[in-house]
Amino acid sequence: MNSRILHKSLLNVSAVVALSLAVWGQCSDANVTGKYGFGIHGFAKNAQPISIAGYIKADGKGTFTATESGSIGGTIFTNVPVSGTYSINPDCTGSAIVKAPKAVNHFNLVVVSGGKSLQTVSADAGNVEIEVVQAQGKAACTLAGLKGTFGIQSSGTFLGVGSVAFDGVFTLDGSGKVSGIESGSLDGAIFTRQSVSGSYTVASNCTGTMTIMIGNQTEHSSFVVTNGGKGMLLVETDPNTVVSGFGQQ
């Protein structure tokens, strides 16, 4: 009796695994189609910390265009156009080549959720970088379309200060104003529930900027909207910072 039950259970498990592999293995370039936001963090060559956020438009045929903002070793760049190619294997792994004005970068990747998200890792020697790519969905790329309360979390480095981490609640009012509270750590020095106020902009491709005041400090960020307007990926754009994070409703 027990042997029959065990045999039946093993057959059921095998069927589930086989079905899962079959579904996972149905991938092609066409799975990566449409508009995405992406965020990269890690270390570039020579151990320079890196944080980037941006926007991708993929054609489903192996090519894409993008813009990106971020920091490499504390040097800031914003709205840099990039382009590239990608190739997706039947098992949902793949690769991509990204052509920026001053560099060509290579990535290995995995397609998840049928193409609603990608996970990538740098394939260039000397780099230690990972990337998350999230579909924008049916986001409305306007001030009024980006409205509501978001949990915001970020971490990274303030050069000359040390490691930093932040967590807070930001409310975007639909007309360009931000309010909220934030807690965090500046190289181990803790602050709690500090008031945040500021402004934000949204471009037609669902990228945007945010300027906030917290205490006596002004901070600037670039972001890209994801998940139908319910999420965002962010990167700080103040000199000598390498900080990135995400927000979600």
Image (cartoon, rainbow, N blue to C red):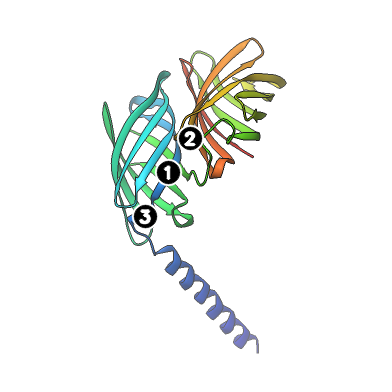
Q: Indicate the quadrant containing the N terminus: top left, top right, bottom left or bottom right.
A: bottom right
Mark 3 lies on residue: 93
Q: How crowded is mark 1: few (under 14 residues within 10 Å), some or many (20 or more)?
A: many
* Residue 228 higher or lower than 14, as above or below: above
- Residue 120: x and y, percent? 40, 44
Q: Indicate the quadrant containing the C terminus: top left, top right, bottom left or bottom right.
A: top right
Q: Quadrant for residue 191, please give it.
A: top right
Chain-order first, disc 3 or disc 1: 1
Q: Nearer the viewer, residue 9 or 34?
A: 34
Chain-order first, disc 2 or disc 1: 1
- Residue 96: x and y, percent? 31, 45
Q: Are marks 2 and 3 in contact (CB under 8 Å)?
A: no
Mark 1 lies on residue: 35
- Residue 182: x and y, percent? 67, 24
Q: Do the residues labelled 2 and 1 touch (CB within 8 Å)?
A: yes
Chain-order first, disc 2 or disc 3: 3
Q: Residues within 10 Å of mark 3 (few under 14, many from 20)?
A: many
Q: Are marks 3 and 1 in contact (CB under 8 Å)?
A: no
Residue name at image x 41 percent, y 19 percent: 76
- Residue 20: x and y, percent? 48, 67
Q: Amino acid under label 2?
A: Cys
Q: Which residue lies furthest to the top in this view?
A: 216
* Residue 77 higher or lower than 18, as above or below: above
Spatial CA span between label 3 and label 1: 20 Å
Residue name at image x 67 percent, y 13 percent: 215
Q: Is mark 3 on a helix, strand or loop?
A: strand
Q: Amino acid under label 3?
A: Thr
Spatial CA span between label 2 and label 3: 27 Å
Mark 2 lies on residue: 206
Q: Which residue lies furthest to the bottom in this view?
A: 1
Spatial CA span between label 2 and label 1: 9 Å
